[in-house]
């Protein structure tokens, strides 16, 4: 009886699949919230809707990246942002394939999903990003959306993980 060839290692780790699932969930939540805000709720027609003393729904079309930074003026800027976001998503997807830590997988998935929802889908469909979550009652001056939140939380998780990894490496070097 001939020996069977060794099994090939999986191209994507289980944490990689988790990152992809998180990205898909973020895209669905982001786009569903925007579909409701722009469709049945019709926030552009309603204007500002106060939900709580510290929270309002306010329609803002953002031509820039997260929180209005680096505004893309005209079609060239729009398509350059789409291309840049697509390149970032591909790079993150490649990184996620080999992810071996839960926090990394969650963080990368959040950033990928946010980049797809905002900087690819919204820009292709609308030419700008649909923002509507307004916490100016708390002194936070930017209006944002689900994808912005996912990107922000993902980046914070990556920074925390890097800081903890540096601390662990430093303490291991001291022992």
Image (tube, rainbow, N blue to C red):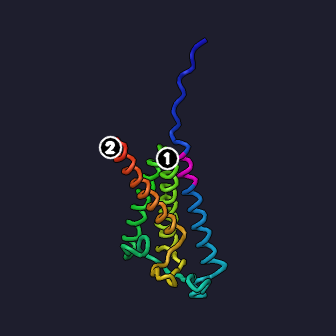
- Residue 124 seen anywhere in this rendered image of the structure: no
Distance between mark 2 and mark 1 Cα atoms: 24 Å
* Quarter containing the C terminus: top left
Q: Residues within 10 Å of mark 2 (few under 14, many from 20)?
A: few
Residue 155 belongs to magenta span: no
Proximity of marks 2 and 1: CB atoms separated by less than 8 Å: no
SS for dot 2: helix
Magenta stretch holds residue 18: yes
**Point 56% across, 62% down: residue:** 27
Percent across and percent down for residue 86 are 44, 58
- Choose the circle earlier in sequence order: 2 or 1: 1
Span highlighted in magenta in the image:
15-21
- As displayed, is residue 91 above or below residue 114? above
Q: Secondary structure at mark 1?
A: loop
* Residue drawn at the location 45% of the way across and 47% of the way down: 94
The label on residue 101 is 1
Q: Which residue is mark 2?
A: 174
Q: Quadrant of the N terminus?
A: top right
């Amino acid at each position: 009886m001939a020996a069977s060839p060794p099994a090939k290692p999986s191209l994507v780790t289980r944490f990689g699949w988790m990152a992809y699932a998180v990205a898909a969930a973020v895209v669905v939540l982001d786009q569903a919230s925007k579909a409701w805000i722009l469709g049945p709720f019709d926030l552009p027609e309603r204007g500002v809707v106060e939900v709580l003393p510290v929270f309002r729904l306010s329609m803002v079309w953002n031509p820039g990246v997260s929180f209005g930074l680096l505004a893309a003026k005209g079609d060239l800027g729009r398509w350059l942002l789409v291309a840049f976001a697509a390149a970032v998503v591909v790079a993150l997807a490649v990184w996620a394939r080999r992810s071996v830590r839960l926090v990394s997988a969650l963080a990368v998935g959040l950033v990928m999903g946010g980049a797809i929802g905002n900087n690819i889908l919204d820009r292709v469909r609308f030419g700008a990003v649909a923002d509507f979550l307004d916490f100016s009652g708390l002194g936070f001056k930017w209006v944002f959306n689900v994808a912005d939140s996912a990107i922000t939380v993902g980046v914070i998780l990556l920074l925390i993980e890097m800081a903890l990894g540096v601390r662990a490496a430093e303490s291991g070097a001291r022992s």
